[in-house]
C-alpha cells in the first residue's frame, strides 16, 4: 500500500476511535475517498458518519452517482439523506459547503432546554444557535457564550441577536467568502429558495477549501495536474505532465526563433549573447512576482476582474521603477566589464522595457483567464515565461540592432 494512502487510512481510523475529525479534515477529497475504499467494511460507514457532512460529501463527489449510492445505502437513512442533499448542489456552492446539522430552536425555548438539546447532540465546536419560526424562517441567532452565561429560565428571545447575513444554497463560493469576510462570521446561515434555514457554512470548512485551492493553484501554474500527489505513480505523473512539457518546448523554440532573427547582430557583437540571460532572467522574475501577487489577490477575493486597470497599472509602475534601479546597477556592471558605454546604455534601456512588459503581463494573464471563465492558475507560469523570454530577447537584441553604431 502507498505510504500516503496508509497515513490517510490511519487518520480516518483515529477519527473513528477518538470521535475527533481534525485528522480527517486535513485529507484532500480524492485521497480521503481512496482511504475510505481501503477501510474494512465495518469501519466505512461509521467514518463517513463521524466526519463533517460537507467533508464526507466532498469525498463522495469524487465517485460517480452509482458509486455514491453504494456508499449511501450503508448509512442510516437520516445521514444518507443529508449527504444526498449536499451532493445535489453544484460544486463550490454554499449548499455543497454547508453543514446541514444546525440546531434550530424556537424563540420561547429556555436556556435550560437549549443546553439539554446541545448536550444531546454530542457535537464539538458549536459556536452559534439559530432561532426560527414554525416554518423554519430565521428570526435571530444566539452565541453559545450567551447561553453559557444566562440563567436557566432565560428565554432565547431575550438574548438573541439579529442575523447579520444569510446566503442562498446555490450561491457561489465567492459570494460566501465575501459575506464571511465582510461580517467576520464564524457560521453563515444557508437558506433554500423559500428562505427556510437548511444549514450553515462553517468558516473552518471554507478555510480548508481555500487551502486546497491554493495548493492546486501551485501545481496548475506550472502545468502539473491538480490530481497529482507526491506519491502518485510515475506513469500518472508522466501522462499528466508530458503534454505541458511539449507545449513548453514549443514556446522555447519560439523564443529561440526570436534570437535567430538577430543572428547577424549576435555574430558581430558576441557580448550580446553573454548578456541575453541577464535580461531574460530579470524580466522573468519581475513577471513571476506580479503573477504571484495577482494570483493571491484573486484567491483571497481582494480583487476581481473589474480591478484590472488598477492592478495592471500598479504592476507596470512597479516594473518601471524596479527596472530603473536594476538598469542602473546592470549598466554600471556592464560598463566596468566591457568598457562600452553604448552596450551599457542599450542593456539599461532594454532592462526597463522588458521589466515593464513583464509586470503588465504578469498581472494581466490571470485576470484575462478569470474574465474568460478559465482557471487563472492553469499553466499561467508557462505562458508568462514565453512572454518574458520573447519580449526580453526582442527588446535587447532589437535595440542593439537599431543602435549597433554605439557598440
Image (cartoon, rainbow, N blue to C red):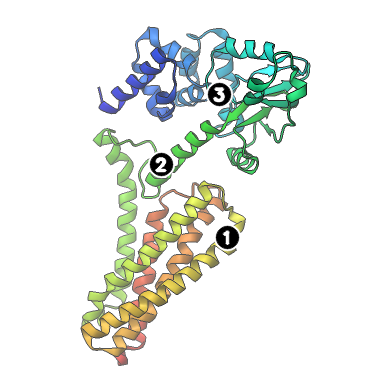
Farthest residue to the bottom: give it: 405
> In the image, 138: left or right of 242?
right
Tags 2 and 3 in contact by the CB under 8 Å rule? no
Label 2: which residue? Answer: 215
Q: What's the distance in space between the residues labelled 2 and 3, CA to CA? A: 24 Å
Q: How busy is the neighbourhood of tag 1: few (under 14 within 10 Å), some, or many (20 plus)?
A: some
Residue closer to the observer: 145 or 315:
145
Q: Is residue 398 visible?
A: no
Q: Earlier in the sequence, mark 2 or mark 1?
A: 2
Element on which disc 1 rests: helix
Quarter occupied by residue 39 = top left
Camera-side mark, 2 or 3: 2
> In the image, 215: left or right of 241?
right
Element on which disc 3 rests: helix
Q: Quadrant of the N terminus?
A: top left
Label 1: which residue? Answer: 308
Residue closer to the observer: 263 or 6:
6
Q: What's the distance in space between the residues labelled 2 and 1, CA to CA? A: 24 Å
> In the image, 79: left or right of 130?
left
Quarter occupied by residue 393 = bottom left
Q: Residue at x 49, y 25 (%)?
A: 55
Q: Residue at x 47, y 19 (%)?
A: 51
Q: Earlier in the sequence, mark 1 or mark 3?
A: 3
Q: Residue at x 51, y 23 (%)?
A: 57
Q: What's the distance in space between the residues labelled 1 and 3, CA to CA? A: 35 Å
Camera-side mark, 1 or 3: 1
Q: Residue at x 72, y 32 (%)?
A: 163
Q: Earlier in the sequence, mark 2 or mark 3?
A: 3
Q: Position of residue 230 (x, y in %)?
A: 29, 36
Q: Position of residue 300 (x, y in %)?
A: 53, 47
Label 3: which residue? Answer: 87
Amino acid at each position: 500500500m502507498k505510504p500516503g494512502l496508509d497515513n490517510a487510512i490511519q487518520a480516518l481510523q483515529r477519527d473513528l476511535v477518538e470521535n475527533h475529525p481534525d485528522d480527517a479534515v486535513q485529507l484532500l477529497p480524492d485521497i480521503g475517498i481512496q482511504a475510505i475504499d481501503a477501510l474494512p467494511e465495518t469501519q466505512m460507514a461509521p467514518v463517513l458518519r463521524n466526519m463533517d457532512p460537507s467533508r464526507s460529501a466532498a469525498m463522495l463527489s469524487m465517485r460517480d452517482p452509482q458509486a455514491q449510492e453504494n456508499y449511501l445505502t450503508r448509512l442510516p437513512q437520516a445521514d444518507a439523506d443529508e449527504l444526498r442533499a449536499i451532493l445535489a448542489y453544484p460544486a463550490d456552492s454554499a449548499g455543497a459547503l454547508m453543514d446541514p446539522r444546525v440546531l434550530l430552536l424556537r424563540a420561547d425555548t429556555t436556556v435550560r432546554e437549549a443546553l439539554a438539546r446541545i448536550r444531546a447532540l454530542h457535537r464539538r465546536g458549536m459556536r452559534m444557535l439559530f432561532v426560527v419560526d414554525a416554518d423554519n424562517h430565521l428570526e435571530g441567532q444566539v452565541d453559545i457564550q450567551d447561553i453559557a452565561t444566562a440563567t436557566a429560565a432565560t428565554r432565547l428571545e431575550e438574548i438573541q441577536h439579529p442575523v447579520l447575513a444569510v446566503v442562498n444554497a446555490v450561491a457561489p463560493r465567492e459570494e460566501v467568502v465575501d459575506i464571511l469576510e465582510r461580517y467576520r462570521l464564524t457560521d453563515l446561515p444557508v437558506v433554500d429558495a423559500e428562505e427556510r434555514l437548511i444549514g450553515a457554512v462553517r468558516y473552518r470548512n471554507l478555510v480548508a477549501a481555500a487551502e486546497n485551492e491554493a495548493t492546486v493553484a501551485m501545481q496548475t501554474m506550472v502545468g502539473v495536474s491538480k490530481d497529482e500527489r507526491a506519491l502518485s505513480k510515475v506513469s500518472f505523473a508522466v501522462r499528466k505532465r508530458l503534454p505541458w512539457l511539449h507545449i513548453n518546448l514549443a514556446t522555447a523554440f519560439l523564443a529561440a526563433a526570436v534570437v535567430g532573427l538577430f543572428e547577424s547582430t549576435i555574430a558581430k557583437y558576441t557580448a550580446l549573447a553573454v548578456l541575453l540571460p541577464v535580461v531574460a532572467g530579470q524580466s522573468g522574475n519581475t513577471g513571476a512576482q506580479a503573477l504571484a501577487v495577482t494570483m493571491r489577490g484573486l484567491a483571497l477575493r481582494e480583487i476581481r476582474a473589474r480591478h484590472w486597470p488598477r492592478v495592471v497599472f500598479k504592476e507596470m509602475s512597479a516594473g518601471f521603477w524596479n527596472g530603473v534601479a536594476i538598469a542602473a546597477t546592470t549598466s554600471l556592471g556592464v560598463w566596468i566589464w566591457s568598457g562600452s558605454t553604448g552596450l551599457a546604455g542599450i542593456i539599461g534601456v532594454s532592462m526597463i522595457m522588458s521589466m515593464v512588459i513583464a509586470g503588465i503581463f504578469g498581472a494581466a494573464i490571470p485576470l484575462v483567464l478569470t474574465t474568460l471563465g478559465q482557471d487563472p492558475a492553469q499553466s499561467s507560469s508557462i505562458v508568462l515565461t514565453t512572454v518574458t523570454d520573447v519580449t526580453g530577447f526582442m527588446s535587447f537584441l532589437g535595440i542593439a540592432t537599431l543602435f549597433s553604431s554605439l557598440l
